[in-house]
Amino acid sequence: QSVLTQPPSASGTPGQRVTISCSGSSSNIGSNYVYWYQQLPGTAPKLLIYRNNQRPSGVPDRFSGSKSGTSASLAISGLRSEDEADYYCAAWDDSLSVPYVFGTGTKVTVL
Amino acid sequence: EVQLVESGGGLVQPGRSLRLSCAASGFTFDDYAMHWVRQAPGKGLEWVSGISWNSGSIGYADSVKGRFTISRDNAKNSLYLQMNSLRAEDTALYYCAKDMQGAVAGTLFDYWGQGTLVTVSS
């Protein structure tokens, strides 16, 4: 059961900028780092952003993350066909019953 | 190169048991916490269980508490998930995931395996 809310879909044409939102609460996004994962069709999730806005080595700088209060965003600039995937936000939650929470997921389509 | 390879999935009847394994390589296994995350067909991601580097801290999602047991063998660079009393709603692709630190607290996962499929059906 997802605790973080994302729009189910987003789309853009090649070269455009697409933004995905992730809404949480004070116990997760509001007090902990946000992570973003990219899941290409038929593959395992891949870490895209950690600690709100840090990119692992190898992740293009077209991907950027931000956080404000209890919400976070992932922006993809210069959209490319290979960016078509599902994107999930995630965070640690201070609630001991569900320590790791994921977003509902956003399907990005490149038109 | 970090590699996580899951195994042990399959078709099992409701109420039966299954043991998943994850073989890790390419990093110092006993420095990091490890987790199991699952994804039901066509659905999102759900954290199942996590274990700290020395097995001193273990956590479970409410949905599996009392039925699943996570463990690790640092000498074998392996992570396990013993799943008992399986239900239809446990049907999912089970991923092994490496934490970014040794404790089960605050940080999330930087590497994932390809997953092993568990299907619970009569």
Image (cartoon, coloured by chain):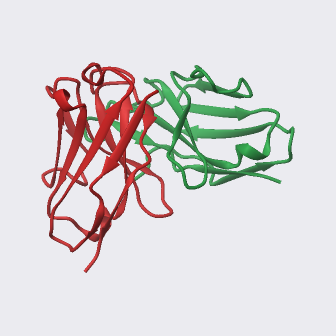
Which residue lies at the image location 38% right of the left edge and 38% below the top edge?
B4
Q: Nearer the viewer, residue B117 or B99?
A: B117
Q: Which chain is green?
A: A
Q: Is residue A44 visible?
A: yes
Q: On the rendered structure, is A51 left or right of B96?
A: right
Where residue B60 sits in the image (x, y, percent)? Answer: 23, 43
Where residue A65 sits in the image (x, y, percent)? Answer: 63, 27
Which residue lies at the image location 65% right of the left edge and 33% below the top edge?
A74
Q: Is residue A87 above or below residue B25?
A: below
Q: In the figure, residue A62 lies in which quadrant?
A: top right
Q: Is residue B57 visible?
A: no
Where residue A14 sits in the image (x, y, percent)? Answer: 86, 43
Which residue lies at the image location 45% right of the left edge and 43% below the top edge?
A102
Q: How many marks?
A: 0
Q: Which chain is red?
A: B
Q: Nearer the viewer, residue A51 or B115?
A: B115
Where residue B88 sits in the image (x, y, percent)? Answer: 29, 70
Q: Is residue B79 above or below residue A105?
A: above
Q: On the rendered structure, is A87 left or right of B117?
A: right
Q: Nearer the viewer, residue B21 or A3?
A: B21
Q: Is residue A25 above or below residue A1?
A: above
Q: In the figure, residue A69 lies in which quadrant?
A: top right
Q: Nearer the viewer, residue B58 or A5?
A: B58
Which residue lies at the image location 40% right of the left edge and 40% below the top edge?
A101
Q: On the rendered structure, is B48 left or right of B46?
A: left
For the C terminus of chain B, which image quadrant? bottom left
